[in-house]
């Protein structure tokens, strides 16, 4: 009864402010915008873009061989540009406007209706998902998520995919895989959102999704020439460590920015992000130290990224102590996935996009169900109920992400071919695809 | 005249340079090289993938000298480059037919 009263009071409060709580983007008076929230979300948006360029680009760029470093940097940079325009075309609209269970509508195609009108009208549009910041900022913030997700996949197929095929794959993947999953999980009319799946900042939408696409792409493409026989050590781990560090800093925008506001929840999300990342970095480092004999730079950097991935779905729902547990689990489990599982099963996930993002995302999404704090999240479900809901979210994303990616890749392979020629691969993608080299 | 080629441990270069200068050598050429000998390489591990690095980084120096200086020079290199551990390197001695100083056209002993 008490709950019902509270709910009614909340509904009334929202109704007083908004007429009815909006379920679609609307035009409001500019004075209803929060300057604090907007300032933080502008900042977060810039931070998340920095995760892709140069963060992820350097993280991956340092791990490949010298002959492929420019091609790897180029992939991330080009994906950022292509997905940006797709977001304007229809991506944002399909993801974040109400529609069916699986996809939003066309109302914001070409950002139509997303507006700001200066004095004396002084109105602007806001998303129904973030009522205190301009919709322009919300759409930009979400854009930075949409660009980094496909860029993560590139780690799985490094060193061997045609640039043209990659552009087509990323464009198709963005609209046919990322956008529907984002809608299903984050938009209130979406299927998994309505089912109660908790994904604060993208454990399913971003990481499981990209990880499964990565697994599909390294299976469809096959191994790198000479894999297992030739030396393929990272050419510059300094770049990789700088990249991992930029990812870590940028991730505060990713997770704390997912509060959509400059508030207590954003602060908690930031705190738990730091805890989980440190725990995971150490977890990977000690696991490696004890089993392989030395604590490596690549190991601690990989562990940090695994922790960032795993805390992503949990960040707005859990407290700091569970965050440490989530981080440790992610560090150790992802270490096992990247060093043992991969070699055991024999797929060539070159830079461990699946091992770190797919596995780390699953660890995080499932543990979110176990550690979700009622106090922080307001979620009332029992642990078992929520765990099963999370399992459903993980399974749907993983299966859809894998199957859809696999089909898209197969089609592209038949039509234009996915893989570079053997000669191009031997020579290196920098020279053969881009006509440049760092030597 | 002889051409002395020595493969040494990279961190010994400065000591060798000082030692050969002391006996009157007026110039030498240095190259960074890789190779293997009795010293074994090392293993690198990246996310569980192990690579054996068989070619060890070494420094190669080349010095042209008059016959009279050869033994003294070899002694100087041995003394300055030696650590007593495997991997200290080797010295090769070749006959040298001609030496020309490009700037002046001087030849042989006066060009060294």
Image (cartoon, coloured by chain):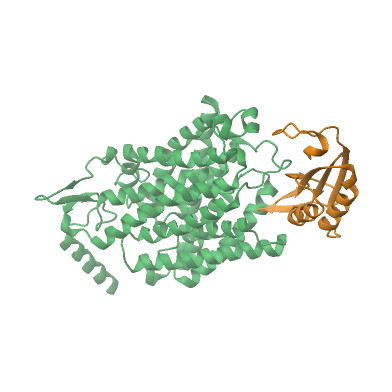
Chain colours: A green, B orange
Question: x, y (%) of residue B28?
Answer: 75, 45
Tell me where residue A82 sits by quadrant: top left
Question: x, y (%) of residue A253?
Answer: 39, 58
Tell me where residue A382 sits by quadrant: bottom left
| Residue A158 in sight | no
Tell me where residue A333 sits by quadrant: bottom right
Is the residue A310 above or below the residue A143 in the image? below
| Residue occupying the point 65% across, 43% down | A347
Residue nearest the viewer, comparing A17 with A38: A38
Is the residue A99 above or below the residue A43 in the image? above
Question: x, y (%) of residue A385?
Answer: 45, 63
Quadrant of the image containing the N terminus of chain A: bottom left
Quadrant of the image containing the C terminus of chain A: top right
Question: x, y (%) of residue B68?
Answer: 90, 45
Is the residue B9 above or below the residue A314 in the image? above
| Residue occupying the point 87% across, 50% down | B74
Residue nearest the viewer, comparing B28 with A435: B28
Disc tally is 0
Residue occupying the far left of the picture: A120
Question: Is B98 left or right of A131, judged from the image as shown?
Answer: right
Residue occupying the far top of the picture: A415
| Residue occupying the point 43% across, 36% down | A171
| Residue B72 in sight | yes
| Residue occupying the point 56% across, 52% down | A240
Question: Is A50 left or right of A395, judged from the image as shown?
Answer: left
Question: Is B41 left or right of A98, judged from the image as shown?
Answer: right
């Amino acid at each position: 009864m008490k709950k019902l009263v509270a709910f009614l009071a909340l509904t009334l409060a929202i109704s007083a402010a908004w007429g009815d709580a909006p379920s679609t983007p609307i035009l409001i008076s500019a004075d209803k915008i929060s300057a604090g929230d907007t300032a933080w979300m502008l900042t977060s948006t810039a931070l998340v873009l920095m995760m892709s360029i140069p963060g992820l680009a350097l993280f991956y760029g340092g791990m490949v061989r010298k002959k492929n470093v420019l091609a790897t940097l180029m992939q991330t940079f080009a994906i950022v540009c292509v997905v940006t325009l797709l977001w304007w075309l229809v991506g944002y609209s399909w993801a974040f406007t109400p529609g069916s269970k699986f996809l939003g509508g066309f109302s914001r195609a070409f950002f139509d209706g997303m507006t700001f009108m200066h004095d004396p009208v002084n109105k602007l549009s806001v998303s129904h998902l973030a009522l205190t910041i301009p919709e322009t900022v919300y759409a930009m913030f979400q854009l930075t998520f949409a660009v980094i997700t496909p860029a993560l996949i590139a780690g799985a197929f490094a060193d061997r995919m045609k640039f043209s095929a990659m552009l087509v794959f990323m464009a198709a993947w963005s609209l046919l895989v990322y956008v529907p999953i984002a809608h299903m999980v984050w938009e209130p009319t979406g299927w998994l959102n309505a089912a109660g799946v908790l994904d604060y900042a993208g454990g399913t939408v971003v990481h499981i999704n990209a990880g499964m696409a990565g697994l599909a792409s390294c299976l469809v493409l096959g191994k790198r020439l000479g894999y297992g026989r030739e030396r393929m050590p990272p050419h510059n781990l300094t770049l990789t460590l700088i990249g991992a560090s930029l990812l870590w800093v940028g991730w505060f925008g990713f997770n704390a920015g997912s509060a959509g506001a400059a508030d207590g929840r954003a602060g908690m999300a930031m705190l738990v992000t730091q805890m989980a990342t440190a725990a995971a970095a150490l977890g990977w480092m000690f696991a490696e130290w004890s089993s392989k004999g030395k604590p490596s730079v690549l190991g601690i950097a990989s562990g940090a990224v695994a922790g960032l991935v795993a805390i992503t779905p949990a960040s707005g729902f859990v407290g700091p102590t569970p965050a440490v547990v989530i981080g440790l689990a992610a560090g150790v489990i992802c270490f096992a996935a990247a060093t043992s599982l991969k070699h055991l099963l024999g797929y060539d996930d070159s830079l461990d996009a699946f091992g770190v993002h797919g596995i780390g995302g699953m660890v995080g999404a499932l543990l979110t169900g176990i550690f979700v704090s009622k106090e922080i999240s307001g979620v009332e479900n029992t642990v078992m109920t929520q765990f099963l809901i999370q399992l459903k979210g993980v399974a749907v994303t993983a299966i859809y992400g894998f199957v859809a990616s696999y089909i898209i890749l197969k089609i592209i392979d038949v039509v234009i071919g996915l893989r570079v020629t053997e000669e191009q691969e031997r020579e290196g993608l920098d020279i053969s695809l881009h006509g440049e080299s760092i030597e | 005249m002889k051409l002395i080629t020595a493969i040494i441990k990279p961190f010994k270069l400065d000591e060798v340079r000082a030692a050969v200068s002391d006996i009157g050598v007026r110039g030498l050429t240095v190259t960074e090289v890789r190779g293997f000998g009795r010293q074994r390489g090392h293993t690198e591990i990246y996310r569980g993938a192990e690579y054996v690095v068989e070619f060890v980084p070494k420094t190669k120096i080349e010095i042209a000298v008059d016959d009279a200086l050869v033994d003294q020079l070899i002694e100087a290199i041995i003394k300055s480059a030696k650590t007593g551990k495997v991997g200290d390197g080797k010295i090769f001695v070749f006959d040298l037919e001609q030496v020309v100083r490009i700037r002046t056209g001087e030849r042989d002993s006066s060009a060294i």
